[in-house]
Image: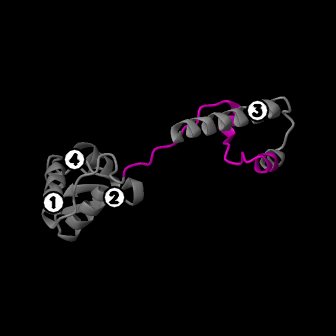
């Protein structure tokens, strides 16, 4: 009996929503305020604009916390390994100054991870840099 009652309730709700949509679609001059008040009065305040327009409702998926291209640098050993990979890549440049984007495209990692690694290497005297902001270029010392 419970399943039948639930199905009946869902059907009634569907037809109420459809009737509401049919009525307002014949009155395109209806304001959002009027729609809201009418929906509130008849228990249909949970309708979305997409439903009113007959558009499918798309819910955006939450982005995962791990960014695309991110590498694991949570532990000291992982950071050291990543720093070494960055330094080795800069050494292949034969003294040529390379951008952080160049490093990221070859080694991986997020922009923040690359910047932090480069700053650690600069602090240790293993990397030099020239320029500012987006024009900053790096080379092995």
Residue at the location (14% across, 62% down)?
80
Closer to the chain start, of discs 3 and 1, is: 3
Calculate the distance from the C-alpha at mark 2 to the C-alpha at mark 1.
15 Å
Closer to the chain start, of discs 1 and 4, is: 1
Q: How many residues crowd around disc 2 within 10 Å: few (fewer than 14), some, or many (20 or more)?
A: few
Residue 39 got which mark?
Answer: none
Calculate the distance from the C-alpha at mark 3 to the C-alpha at mark 1.
60 Å
Identify the image quadrant of the C terminus: bottom left
Closer to the chain start, of discs 4 and 2, is: 4
Residue 140 belongs to the span the image colors magenta: no
Residue 19 got which mark?
Answer: 3
Q: Which residue is mark 1?
A: 78
Vertical position of residue 12 compared to residue 116: above or below:
above
Vertical position of residue 60 compared to residue 23: above or below:
below
- On the picture, is 55 further left or further right than 61? right
Vertical position of residue 84 compared to residue 18: above or below:
below
Residue at the location (58% across, 36% down)?
57
Residue at the location (27% across, 65% down)?
119
- On the picture, is 5 further left or further right than 105? right
In the image, which is nearer the foreground, mark 2 or mark 1?
1
Q: Nearer the viewer, residue 45 or 34?
A: 45
Spot occupied by residue 128 in the image (x, y as percentages of width and height): 23, 62
Residue at the location (78% across, 48% down)?
36
- Element under disc 1: helix
- Element under disc 2: helix
Residue 112 got which mark?
Answer: 2
């Amino acid at each position: 009996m419970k399943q039948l009652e639930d199905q009946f309730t869902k059907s009634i709700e569907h037809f109420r929503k459809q009737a509401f949509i049919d009525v307002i679609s014949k009155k395109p001059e209806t304001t959002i305020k009027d729609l809201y008040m009418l929906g509130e009065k008849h228990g249909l305040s949970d309708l979305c604009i997409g439903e009113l327009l007959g558009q499918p409702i798309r819910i955006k998926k939450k982005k995962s916390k791990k960014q695309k291209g991110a590498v694991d640098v949570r532990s000291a050993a992982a950071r050291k390994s990543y720093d070494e990979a960055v330094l080795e890549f800069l050494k292949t440049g034969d003294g040529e100054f390379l951008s952080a984007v160049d490093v990221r495209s070859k080694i991986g990692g997020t922009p923040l991870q690359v910047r932090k690694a480069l700053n650690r290497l600069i602090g240790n005297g293993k990397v030099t840099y020239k320029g500012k902001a987006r024009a900053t270029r790096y080379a092995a010392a």
